[in-house]
Amino acid sequence: MSAAEIALVMHEDRESAAGALAQAMHRGPAQSVAAALMQLESIADQASTEQQAADLNALRQTLLHLAGELQEMTAALRPPILDHCGLAAALESLAESFSQTGAIAAQVIDDRSRREPRPGDVTLYRMAEHSLADIRQRGHAHRATLELGRRGRFRWLQVRDDGVQPPTTAESRHGWLRELATAMRGFYFHSSALGQGTCVEMAVPMETR
Amino acid sequence: MPTRVFIVDDHQIVRQGLTMLLERAGMELAGEAADGQQALRMVAELDPDVTVMDVGLPILNGLETAAEMIKLRPKMPIIMLTMYYDRQHVLRSLRAGARGVVSKAHAADQLVRAIRDVQRGKIHLSPEMSEVVIDAFQNQDEGEREMLTPRELQVLQLVAEGKSMKEVAAALMISVKTAETHRAHTMEKLDIHETASLVRYAIRRGLLQA
């Protein structure tokens, strides 16, 4: 087994474990908290004193807080939108969040050629996440564009920006993505010239290996 | 006559909680399903007034189920329940045809109002969701324009001006086949299926004077 293949197995194992944990949290505690809130509402009018009403309200606020925390933890493990709405929607959500939390505007262009979930979706999503984080870290970019499409039997994602990063540093930070793409029988390109922005492209087969 | 509600959620504990809320509000449970396919099989027979459905369903997810259900029963309003109220969840629920989107954590105090609203023909969004939707619609035109490539915008404009594919190809110095491909991609991206609608779109977007 080559180093790239080992990296792929580790990546898939990690994503699989994170996905399973997120799913378990979503299906278990998150739903139980939602149900508890509903049950609480149904007994709210049975409070006979102001103190009881205040206690029930405090309990409600605690449960709402817990629901919010569970949502954040689940999303950090694996964005639920990826499973519910697909890669394009997940990228749009990522771009929106990126734009809101920094001074760099991010936009998604989706050719809408395929909407069904594909095995490489998580990898492409992680590539986008990594690339946007990289853009933010090195700074000097005002705009980032994520373009999702289909190239033959590959699902393809390009992330480009208008930053001024020196080319060599970004390439070294993206090495693991190149290894993953190779092991998945896909491809990865990175181009960056001083003062001319950076372009990262990754394509993964739409069918499983 | 009480409002009859069909609940579709794969978590039994949530179905029980929702049933409790509905009954307390004087509504009636028309039936319940645990996945999208089961829901589609049951909806015609149950004939509910409103369907309340989770976004993250197994087998066939809630958004796809909603889109199919609307084909079966176009007048029956659907309310989507979601644990997550980011913009994409809300927008895609509305695009699937839902008339309401309610956060599951806030269902206790919002669902009954949402059911009454959609029955009156209104759209109901949880307060925390309204802002993201308004923002999205305000930016929609720009988003659609940016979704098209410069070449597709050129083809769109020429087609809207009444040019034939041969004339478009000549004007842009490309083959007729390539011009046809650009037109097909443009129509697909904009979800437009006839040239007349393409012309109307171009006028609306200021690419062509009416």
Image (tube, grey):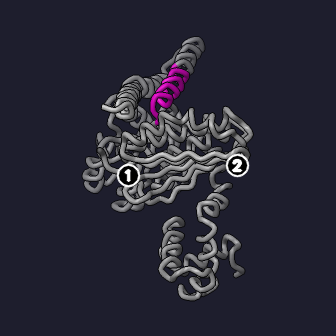
Q: Find disc 1 in the rendering and name its residue.
A: A116
Q: Is residue B44 left or right of residue B208?
A: left
Instruction: Give the camera-side residue of A98 and B77.
Output: A98
Amino acid type shown at disc 2? Gln
Q: What is the chain identity of the residue bearing mark 1?
A: A
User: Is A116 positioned to the left or the right of B186 in the image?
Assistant: left
Residue drawn at (60%, 14%), measured in percent from left and top? Answer: A50
Which quadrant of the figure has residue B202?
bottom right
Q: Nearer the viewer, residue B129 or A124?
A: A124
- Residue A71 within the segment the image draws in magenta: yes
Q: Secondary structure at mark 2?
A: loop
Picture residue at 31% right of the left edge, 54% below the top: B47
Q: Is residue A129 left or right of residue B206?
A: left
Question: For mark 2, what is the residue?
Answer: A196
- Residue drawn at 49 percent across, 31 percent down: A75
Predominant secondary structure, magenta span: helix
**Do callouts 1 and 2 point to residues on the same chain?**
yes
Count of residue discs: 2
Q: Quadrant of the C terminus of chain B?
A: bottom right
Task: Sort mark 1 into few (<14), some (14-19) or many (20+) by Cα contacts within 10 Å.
Answer: few
How far across and down, in percent of the image, does residue B39 sit? 30, 48
Q: Position of residue A105 (x, y in %)?
A: 69, 45
Q: Magenta residues, as a range?
A: A63-79
Q: Amino acid at mark 1?
A: Glu
- Helix, strand or loop status at disc 1: loop
